[in-house]
Amino acid sequence: MLIIENIRLALTAIKSNKMRSFLTMLGIIIGISSVIAITSIGSSAKAVMDDEFSTFGKNAMYVYMNWQMMQDEWVDDSDLLQMEDIEALKSRFGEDIVYIAPSVSAKSDVKVGRVEGKLDMSGVGADYNQFYKMKIVHGRMINSKDVAGARDRIVIEKAAAMKLFNNENAVGETLSVNINGDLRDLSVVGVFEKEKSIFDSMMVSDSFASYVPYSIVQRPGNSMSYIEIYVDLNKDSSVLGTEITNYLAKIKGKQQGLYAFESAKAQLDMINGMLGTLSLAIGAIAAISLVVGGIGIMNIMLVSVTERTREIGIRKSLGARTKDILMQFLIEAMILSAIGGLIGTGLGISIAAVGMSFANISVSIQPGVIVLAVGFSAIVGMFFGLYPAKKAAKLDPIEALRYE
């Protein structure tokens, strides 16, 4: 019951000096709101990057020749990656590799009637949509028969179908494209829809994405610079990437390091690490204002002790113990700080929500951070309120009653 009485006294004291109490809490409010806003924006950015990488697969990997090692040397065809290397990797790593194909592409102008456009054609293997997330809205994706028979097939995006054919269901239509200098008539077997990306506004292009069998895009000799791989999600892509590149060097009789890899997971980890470090650094700077706010609480509580010296004397003369007075002022400091923490939390969430809305990103709030922020603000109040509370508790009741 004594604690409840002390809380009631603290709230009464705060209400009686509303403006002074608010100004006292201001440092805490600014500090907590800054920390909450920064951590929320950082969490939101991480969530967005996670979603973006999920679109093309966190288990994606590119294996390529390390051109830096060959700067001063003649590059032989045997140094480049070959189809037999892909077959060797399939045989060696089995189920660890769920998709593997040459990473090849081509660009071409297209014209349907009077409508002109440009296509970016990516050469892919069978059922590529199972790995790179996309929605097939009409028809199908490139399949194994298309790849094996080097069939003239193409899957275009819905925006291209609407522009070129004025109909999103363009399955069965034909597009004349230029691939490696040859004019080919490709039959549209599917139409897909791209998922929206935050990078769409940053990457302005007048070309439409499309997919064709990699077998019709490969140049004579079938050598390639890049191999696109999707690995088992349960495998460590960094470890598996190292094993793959070392194995390639071994079977081709080349020095270790000639073949390198880049994984989506490694890139995501790097970006998240940078975002985390940046958020932590800015958050730490913002948290300095919490110390300033704590000093403000100490200052006001010392003033409060001086103003209420006679009240303390009366309470002690009526039987209040030293620890009762100590608890009274300590609780008041903690409540001041906790209220500031709650207001700062609400303000910080609002700032993050408004900021993310401009970028069209859903704000991500971590409950643990909110609990930690409010709890930390109460601890700040307790720490900086301890000295004024002790000073109040040690007042001599007789001297306090004489105080004017």
Image (cartoon, rainbow, N blue to C red):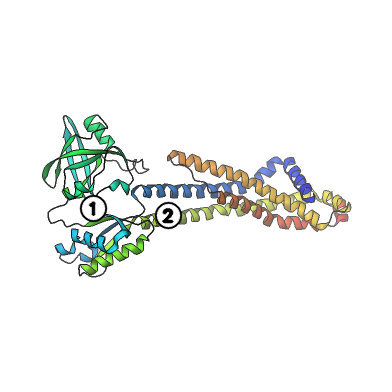
Q: What residue is at 39 percent from the left and 54 percent from the top?
A: 268
Q: Quadrant of residue 67?
A: bottom left
Type of amino acid at the residue the image marks with label 2: Asn
Whole-percent x, y for residue 255 in the image: 23, 70
Q: Does the rendering let one see residue 52? A: yes
**Which numbered mark, 1 or 2, is in the foreground of this view?**
1
In depth, the one of 339 and 111 nearer the eye is 111
Whole-percent x, y for residue 383 in the image: 67, 57
In depth, the one of 191 and 275 nearer the eye is 191
- Image mark count: 2
**Crowdedness near tag 2: few (<14), some (14–19) or many (≥20) residues, C-alpha within 10 Å:** some
In depth, the one of 230 and 149 nearer the eye is 149
Whole-percent x, y for residue 285 in the image: 53, 54
The answer for how far apart the CA atoms under marks 1 and 2 are is: 27 Å
Q: Secondary structure at mark 2?
A: helix
365 left or right of 138 in image: right
Compared with residue 312, is residue 167 higher up or lower down, i.e. above or below? Answer: above
Sequence order check, earlier mark of 1 and 2 = 1
Q: Does the rendering let one see residue 105? A: no
Compared with residue 92, is residue 40 higher up or lower down, i.e. above or below? Answer: above
Q: Quadrant of residue 322?
A: bottom right
Q: What residue is at 88 percent from the left and 53 percent from the top?
A: 317
Q: Secondary structure at mark 1?
A: loop
Whole-percent x, y for residue 358 in the image: 44, 39
Type of amino acid at the residue the image marks with label 1: Ser
Mark number displayed over residue 103: 1
269 left or right of 75 in image: right
Compared with residue 281, is residue 185 higher up or lower down, i.e. above or below? Answer: above
Q: What residue is at 88 percent from the left and 55 percent from the top?
A: 398
**Crowdedness near tag 1: few (<14), some (14–19) or many (≥20) residues, C-alpha within 10 Å:** many
The residue indicated by pointer 2 is 272
